[in-house]
Image (cartoon, rainbow, N blue to C red):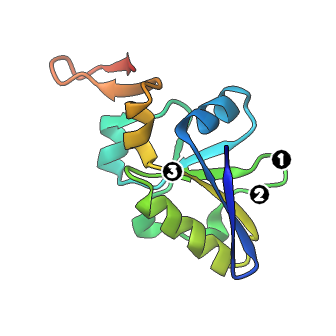
Amino acid sequence: MALSEDLNGGILETLTASEVQEKLNRNEIVLIDVRTPNEYAFESIRGALLFPLANFDPAKLPNQEGKPIVFHCGSGIRSRKVAERCIAAGIMKVSHMDGGFGQWKASQLPFIAVDPATGTLTEKQ
């Protein structure tokens, strides 16, 4: 179940990998990967958009009126930092995925990855 905490008047919601998958499958969220382009190119969650932490600017995020944004990274550390930056910039409710992509894989949820033998994208779980 999602956990919510108050950060300087903003709400930070922490979702499990399973909760993110359910919301993504129902097309209820925009999932943003804040890892590096190399990490994203090697393996990623289908449908996640890339907005790396290195050049992250909360002012450049899409409007959340239609769908809330959920951030994720490799472990949950970078995505939490991004969420905190969003709250500091005046975005009053943001979410991130606890445990990041590592937890996604540990939960055996589907993702796409480059097959090193062929260089093609393959579905993984």
Residue 106: which quarter of the image?
Answer: top left
The label on residue 98 is: 3
For the residue marked with disc 3, what is the amino acid?
A: Asp
- Whole-angstrom CA distance, mark 2 to mark 3, is 23 Å
Left or right side of 122 for 31: right
- Whole-angstrom CA distance, mark 3 to mark 1, is 23 Å
Left or right side of 107 for 38: left
Label 1, on which residue?
66
Q: Is residue 90 above or below residue 123?
A: below
Residue 102: which quarter of the image?
Answer: top left
Query: Are discs 2 and 3 less than 8 Å apart at CB?
Result: no
Front residue (pair 87, 6): 6
Front residue (pair 16, 34): 16
Of the image marks 2 and 3, the number of the one nearer the N terminus: 2
For the residue marked with disc 1, what is the amino acid?
A: Gly
Query: Are discs 1 and 2 less than 8 Å apart at CB?
Result: yes
Of the image marks 3 and 1, the number of the one nearer the N terminus: 1
Residue shown at 39%/53% (left/top)? 35
Residue shown at 63%/37% (left/top)? 19
Front residue (pair 15, 120): 15
Q: Tell me the SS state at disc 3.
A: loop
Q: Give how far across and how far down residue 107 sits, in percent.
A: 44, 30
Q: Residues within 10 Å of mark 3 (few under 14, many from 20)?
A: many
Q: Is residue 44 above or below residue 78?
A: above
Q: Give how far across and how far down residue 88 sits, in percent.
A: 64, 80
Residue shown at 70%/82% (left/top)? 8
- Whole-angstrom CA distance, mark 1 to mark 2, is 7 Å
For the residue marked with disc 2, what is the amino acid?
A: Asn
Label 2, on which residue?
63
